Every structure is written in C-alpha cells, then in structure tokens.
Amino acid sequence: MECRNAIEVVDRRIVALLAQRVTLGLRAATAKRQAGLPITDAAREADVLANVATAAGEHGLSADSVRQIFQRVLTMSRQAQEEAR
C-alpha cells in the first residue's frame, strides 16, 4: 500500500510537470508568433529528443521508451500551441 501511495504521488508530480511544460510552451509560442517564427521547429524537437534519450540512459531507462514518451509530450505541447492561436 505504501508503494502504491508513493507511485500516486509521483504520478501527480509528473502531471504537474507536464502542465508546467505546456504553459512554458505556450509562452514560447507567443514569443515565436511575435517574432514571426513558425510554431514547429523540427531541429529543436530533434534536440529535445536527443537530450531526453541521453538523460534516460543516465537514469538507467530505455532511451527508445523515453523518446517515445517525449514524442507524445511534444505533440501535446504543439496541440496546445495551435489551439491557443
């Protein structure tokens, strides 16, 4: 039971961090629009995926699995930015 509660706490922290990331992405999108830049930056997304793959390895996690998770995180962020237009 104690482990289950601890996992639920971690899950809520992950959700809070995702919300924070989306909020920051929305701020970045506003800055991009003001600068006349496109919302999507394929090179930046590739950097993000490379960075999280490296971090995954440092924590003993599967780089491929973490990359897949972050591909979805990037999609979620992009969708929020598009909806905010």
Image (cartoon, rainbow, N blue to C red):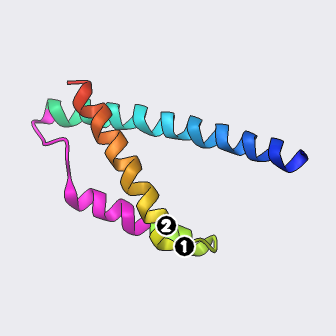
- Quarter holding the C terminus is top left
Q: Amino acid at mark 2?
A: Ser
The disc at residue 76 is none
Task: Identify the element where label 2 is drawn.
Answer: helix
Instruction: Please tell me whether residue 42 belongs to the stretch shown in magenta.
Output: yes
Q: Amino acid at mark 1?
A: Ser
Q: Is residue 32 above or below residue 74?
A: above
Sort mark 1 into few (<14), some (14-19) or many (20+) by Cα contacts within 10 Å: some
**Where is mark 2, residue-wise?**
65
Query: In this image, 12 relative to 44: left or right?
Result: right
Residue, far top: 84
Tell me the magenta residue range: 35-52
Instruction: Please tell me whether residue 71 belongs to the stretch shown in magenta.
Output: no
Magenta stretch, main secondary structure class: helix
**Where is mark 1, residue-wise?**
62
For the point 29% across and 64% down, the residue is 46
For the point 82% across and 41% down, the residue is 5
Residue 80 image point, x, y percent: 32, 32
- Quarter holding the N terminus is top right
Report how far apart the C-alphas of labels 1 and 2 lie in the structure: 5 Å
- Based on the displayed image, in which of its 4 quarters is residue 38 positioned? top left
Residue 27 image point, x, y percent: 33, 31
- Based on the displayed image, in which of its 4 quarters is residue 45 positioned? bottom left
Residue 69 image point, x, y percent: 46, 56
For the point 19% across and 47% down, the residue is 40
